[in-house]
Each structure stands twice: as structure tokens, then as C-alpha cells.
Image: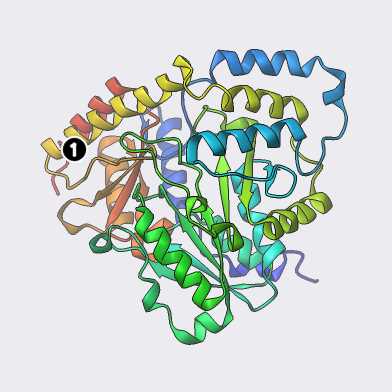
Amino acid sequence: MRTWRAERLGKLPPYLFVEIDRAKQAAIEAGRDVIDFGVGDPDRPTPKFIVERMCDAVRDPANHRYPLGRGKRTFRRTVAAFFERRFGVTLDPEKEIGALLGSKEGIGHFAAAMLNPGEVALVPDPGYPVYISGAVFSEAAYHRMPLRVERGFLPDLSAIPADILRRAKVLWLNYPNNPTAACAPMSFFEEALAFARKHDLLIAQDAAYSETYYEDPPPSILQLPGAKERCVEFHSLSKTFNMTGWRIGFSAGNAVAVTALADVKNNLDSGVFGAVQDAAIAGLENMHHPEVRGILDTYRERRDALVSGLKEIGWEVNYPKATFYLWAKCPKGAASMDAAKRILAEANVVVIPGVGFGTCGEGFVRFALTVETPRIREAVSRLGRITW
């Protein structure tokens, strides 16, 4: 009997979270009080003014038909206005912006739009797994770029082997970064753009957390002169507005790349529901609304409670400047998977082992700030009782 499962699925890196997921579910079914820092999914609702706009838009018969694949013109113009206000970047909404079913979908389909079989995507390690899975599904290749603490979790582009560079076509960046929470200065983007010009690469910058920041606003690589010649960014409304389940984001930048991605999507999906686009417009036009500002205030409070608490019990961790993640060193040099298992078994706390994001994530665990502050304090108290 033939094998029904496609061989390419066997080329995906192993899903190393499965043991933690299984153990977490068993703990919950056993009635244990589990505090879950694993899921990067906001626990607070979408702002009311966005929900109200959605309700109105659902009643509009114009939104009951297939949406345009590239997105409504009103949505794309709103994105262009947001980019102008936020980054001082002028984008053509007709050619340089495309609506996405969340940035994950766009990232996953980008390899199909850009890479031929055998061409290489340069991906960060540790990094978001979709950079690799997109390449695998397109029968392209990938090369991992280590992100080391001593370099501020920025890749050493000069260390990429020459034979890899000859086949490379796409350079993936992700700042603010998941899982490390690192931010890239504009000087690094300048270095990356010069490197891309030298080696004829297209830069794909995952900017899903660009609006989840606590200090200086992170820059866009598109702010650099000439960046649109070989750069495209992926943005998401999921974390900015607590809209993970709504599935909306956008691509912005190089017109050829944005159009190629739209061509792939036109063959695979029918676009973002028009009412969701209308609700997203309300969010993008009201970035300083008290409900939106309140989202950042909540994460800042949680960040401060968790970092200060972990430091008090001897963990090595820094205050992240952006994202809602903490990237913490495992106590006493423990391996990340072993640490995550012990933390769940002995403290009923779920964290993500860093090795699940790549081999260079070994020795770290990731906390998501999607737990209320009192529960964060309870988690820290439990962690403090573990003897390492």
C-alpha cells in the first residue's frame, strides 16, 4: 500500500514541544493548577471600539462577497497612512502593500512566491519555525544563522559560507525578535541591506512585534534609502490589538515581492474577510486610543513583575525592550528541555524550551507575558522552590 503522507513533511524539523504539550494536558486533566507561559496568545479581549466596528461591518452586504486578494483599497491606503505616520515611509498602496490572513500565512507562502527548488533561505536560529517550513513546502533549502547572546542576538552575516551564499536568495530577519525579544538598531539594518546588495539577496523582515514595545519605537528597515529595492516587511495586527483569532496582517515594501506573494495567495485563498479589514482600519487609525495604549501598559506591568521576580530567585534574565516574551537562561546551565520538564513537573508552570526554536536556543526557556500579574507572582514563588 502506498504512503499517503507527502515525503516533504518528513523534512520538517522535529516538533520538540510535543512532550511538553502532552505533559501539560495530563497535568490539567489531573486537576493540577497549571500556570501557562507557553502560548504566545493575548489573554485579554480585542478593544471594544474595534469589535464595534466589526459588528457594523458584518451587517454591510458589500462584505458578504469574496474580498479582493490584495486587500481593500481602503485598507491598503490606511496601512500606507500608518507607515507614513509611524516610520516616515511612503508606500504605494496599489503596488507595495498586500493584505494577509495574518503575517504567519504570508511568511509561510513567501517561499512559494520567491524560491525555486534548491535555492536557499537564510533563517535565524533560534527563530520562528515558519521560515523553515515555508522553504520545505516549496522544496527550497534553508541555512540556519546562529543568534548568539554575545552579539545581542543579531546574526553574523560574515560567517555565512560562500557556497551557501551562491545559492541564497532570501534573508530572513525578525526584529523585534521572537523568541529572544532582541531589537535591532538601524545600524544593523544598514549592514544587512549592504550585505543583501553585495550578494543579490531579498530581505524579508518579520516585524510582527513592531508595535509591542516599552522603550524607543523599533525602526522599519524600509526607512533606509533604497530599501524598497530589495526589502519586504511582514506586519501583524494580532499582538498590537489582541486580534490573534481575527487573522489579519499585511506585507509592505518591494513591489515585485508583494505582487508575487499576492499571486500565490490568489491561487490558494480568497483574501481577508472584508469586515475584518474594516475593523483593522479602525485599529490602525486609532493607535493612541486608550484601549490600545492599555495593552502595552498591561504587558509592561507583567514584564516588570516577572523579570524582577526571576532575578530575586537567582535567574539570569534581562528586561525586554519589545515583544511580550522573556528569554531566560536556564538555571545552573540546565538543558532547555530538561528545565521545561522539571518546571512543569515540580511547579506546574509551563515554559517553552529554547531548543524548540533551533539548536542555538539551547540553554534558554521562553516565557510569554500572557498571564495576569497575580499569577505571575504565584509562578515565581513556585519556581523559587525548585532546587537546581
In the depicted structure, whether residue 293 falls above or below residue 215: above
Q: Nearer the viewer, residue 215 or 303?
A: 215
Q: Which residue is mark 1?
A: 310
User: Does residue 284 appear in this view?
Assistant: yes
How many numbered marks appear?
1
**Secondary structure at numbered mark 1:** helix
Q: Residue at x 47, y 48 (%)?
A: 220
User: Does residue 237 appear in this view?
Assistant: no
Q: Quadrant of residue 115?
A: bottom right
Q: Is residue 339 left or right of residue 292?
A: left
Q: Amino acid at mark 1?
A: Leu
Q: Residue at x 63, y 42 (%)?
A: 250
- Indicate the position of residue 132 as horizontal and vertical percent values: 55, 63
- Indicate the position of residue 362 as horizontal and vertical percent values: 31, 61
Q: Quadrant of residue 75?
A: top right
- Indicate the position of residue 31 as horizontal and vertical percent values: 40, 26
Q: Quadrant of residue 30?
A: top left
Q: Nearer the viewer, residue 28 or 268?
A: 268
- Indicate the position of residue 257 as horizontal and vertical percent values: 68, 59
Give the quadrant of the N terminus: bottom right
In the depicted structure, whether residue 115 falls above or below residue 20: below
Q: Nearer the viewer, residue 229 or 344?
A: 229
Q: Is residue 66 left or right of residue 155?
A: right
